[in-house]
Amino acid sequence: MSHTLNNENDYKITRSKTSHKQELLEQDSQPKSHISNQIHTNTNTNSKNDDIQVNTRQYLADVSNQYGAASSGKPLKSSTISTLTNKRRPLGGDAAPLQQQQQPQSQQLRPLRPTSTNTNSNTNTSNSNSNSNSNSTNNIKMGPPRTDESNEIENKNNIPASSDIKNILPRLPQKRQATESSTNLVEKLHTQPISFPQPSSNNNQGTYKKARLIDYEWQDLDEEDADDPLMASEYVADIFTYFYELEQRMLPDSEYLFKQRHLKPKMRSILVDWLVEMHLKFRLLPESLFLAINIMDRFMSLEVVQIDKLQLLATGSLFIAAKYEEVFSPSVKNYAYFTDGSYTEEEILQAEKYILTILNFDLNYPNPMNFLRRISKADEYDVQSRTLGKYLLEVTAIDYKFIGFKPSLCCASAMYLSRLILGKIPIWNGNLIHYSGGYRVNDMKVCIELIFQYLISPVEHDEFFKKYATRKFMKASILCRSWAKKFHTEGKDLFDETLSTHRIELELSN
């Protein structure tokens, strides 16, 4: 399939940077009173004033101006609020969001002002404060933050004349507390000798972090990749430690399907099956599919979606995921064509901006494929078990029963079942426990049973079943389902303790 360049972001991006910088400099040079007069002009003013009111970020498609998200802390007029609320949202319609996150009013910090005195004092008068006034003009003092009441009183009493405005020095940036403390620390180090604390036997308990007790054997398989810079063996442990912390934050609400008014689990199954078909048609990476489903679930956890906009939500989610994961993402024209003309290119672009606005542009999702590749290291990178693991892992992304499960848990369960299907002994050992993130067999029982129930039940997602029934994927869907039905009829145990061990190799008793 030939990839074409994306031409969807036609928002005056070709505007020259020099002209944009000149406009910003002109706006900064104008007094604040003049800018406020331009912002609050009436509708009967000239067209020149109307051009000045246009936001400079319009060519970036500022979504805050389109969906009523106030980008500044200034209160809006009633007429402005009515025009913003009358604009139709592309996905939510007139329905209110499920979880309205009420953010507290942001307390605007005012920069500290230099305390300057009047330099135009009369030289002939001999006042006792003349010396202090003359010295204070040369020194600018940074005082502590002041309250709003004190600032209002100071503004009323000390209003500089028009001739003195040019003589006032520019405001200095507010120094943070951390910067002040570090500056004082450096000065103390230069003036005072450094004294290191003597180690004592009584304070050793609170000095170091408590290490996790590991009662299984594992091998350091990352040492083999020390010569390969692409594997990043020096940082891989820290990277996956961060992934394990991040996956908890990026999980959708597991109960959002029951909170939606018009959405049912069957509708999501049909929608995801169509999403798999579009993903396969465009020949995208598996990471794009997992990210698209995560975007869609997280969006529906926050917003109420109408039934006639579900297909638009799936299209916009895959469009965003392909931009994030792919090297060459399909054009928006291809997505509009795949929807059979149900949605135009402009509607897909508006849905993209709205989805990203609701999600706060947070796409830092730890992809399940990263965890699967990590476990495959302990599985000696077996192609067969990895292919079956990809199929079983994709089951956890498609079926609604797995919403809210961690991706690392789903990957460990998929690898356990794939090794069980292929008859590998031991099914789970110390290396697999370590490189899966520390999951034991008891931790994976619920997830494994749900995957097994999906395999023995009738086919629910036709396109997904056809995808993995091809020779490219080693007919994984047919193999897994036939094995599950045979295993179920024989009444075998999925969690046979004799086939798993916490050591590297299984110790067989005579």
Image (spheres, grey):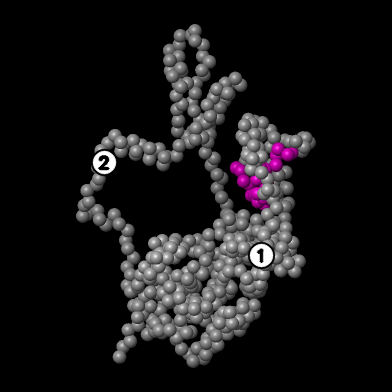
Q: As displayed, is residue 89 above or below residue 117? A: below
Residue 147 placement (x, y as % from top left): 50, 34
User: Which residue lies at the image location 45% right of the left edge and 11% below the top edge?
Assistant: 127
Residue 479 placement (x, y as % from top left): 55, 85
Asked whether residue 60 is drawn in magenta, I would say: yes
Q: Nearer the viewer, residue 139 or 128?
A: 139
Toward which corner of the image does residue 432 lie, by quadrant?
bottom left
User: Which residue lies at the image location 32% right of the left edge and 84% below the top edge?
Assistant: 507
Label 1 sits on residue: 3
Toward which corner of the image does residue 403 lie, by quadrant?
bottom right
Q: As displayed, is residue 506 above or below residue 371? A: below
Is residue 510 visible in the rendered image? The answer is yes
> Mark 2 falls on what kind of element?
loop
In the displayed structure, does residue 406 sit left or right of residue 222? right
Label 2 sits on residue: 194
Q: As displayed, is residue 110 above or below residue 465? A: above
Which residues lie in the magenta part?
50-73
Residue 253 placement (x, y as % from top left): 55, 65
Residue 286 placement (x, y as % from top left): 57, 70
> Mark 1 falls on what kind of element?
loop
Toward which corner of the image does residue 100 lie, by quadrant?
bottom right
Dot label at residue 190: none
